[in-house]
Amino acid sequence: MKKLNLLLSLFLLTTTMLLAQNYKRKTPEEKAKKYTDELLAQIPLEKEQEEKVFQVNILVSKQFDSLYAAKPEQNEMRKAYAFIFKQRDAEFKKIMTKEQFLRYDDWQRELREKRAEAKRLKEESEKQNQTPVPSEK
């Protein structure tokens, strides 16, 4: 039985290591394509607008990659996120029509609300799991 547990543990460790080695980070272009496709699923754009949005998303992705490489403290990270998103939205506002940008803004608000709700539910779940067990006296 001990040999079986040892072999199973060794197998799992080896498999995990192989999977970790095969992990490939996405390029800024791949990330920009994914985000642009998500945006296009919500907001129809002309081909010219689509290309401009894609280029903005590449720049944003590169900015985030640089930010992550610098490993700033959490407060600085939040400020940088806000700055990058503000720049992106300003560029999108130039590219999109007023109606398109309003739809984009609504979509972003919905995403923020979903993330906030998921975070709230996670925190509630963690609090429930941390309830102290009454000690016997």
Image: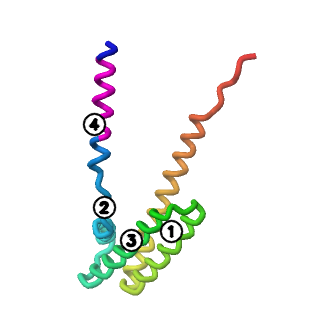
Picture coordinates of residue 35, whole percent (x, y):
33, 67
Q: Distance between the residues labelled 2 and 3?
A: 11 Å
Q: Which residues make up the magenta segment?
A: 4-17
Picture coordinates of residue 28, whole percent (x, y):
33, 68
Residue drawn at point x = 23 percent, y = 82 percent = 47
Looking at the rendered structure, the kind of residue marked 3 is Lys
Q: How far apart are marks 3 and 1 (CA)?
A: 13 Å
Which callout, 2 or 1, points at the residue further toward the start of the chain? Answer: 2
Dot in front, 2 or 1:
2
Q: In which quarter of the image is residue 76?
A: bottom right
Looking at the rendered structure, the kind of residue marked 4 is Thr
Mark 1 and mark 2 in contact (Cβ < 8 Å)?
Answer: no
- Residue at disc 4, secondary structure: helix
Which callout, 3 or 1, points at the residue further toward the start of the chain? Answer: 3
Density class for disc 2 (Cα within 10 Å; few <14, some 14-19, many ≥20) is few
Residue hosting label 4: 15
Picture coordinates of residue 88, whole percent (x, y):
43, 77
Q: Which mark is residue 26?
A: 2
In this picture, residue 10 sits left or right of residue 127: left
Density class for disc 1 (Cα within 10 Å; few <14, some 14-19, many ≥20) is some
In this picture, residue 79 sits left or right of residue 36: right
Residue hosting label 3: 62
Density class for disc 4 (Cα within 10 Å; few <14, some 14-19, many ≥20) is few
Q: Main secondary structure of the magenta part?
A: helix
Depth check, front residue: 62 or 124: 62
Picture coordinates of residue 42, whole percent (x, y):
33, 69
Q: Is residue 100 magenta?
A: no
Depth check, front residue: 93 or 27: 27
Mark 3 and mark 4 in contact (Cβ < 8 Å)?
Answer: no
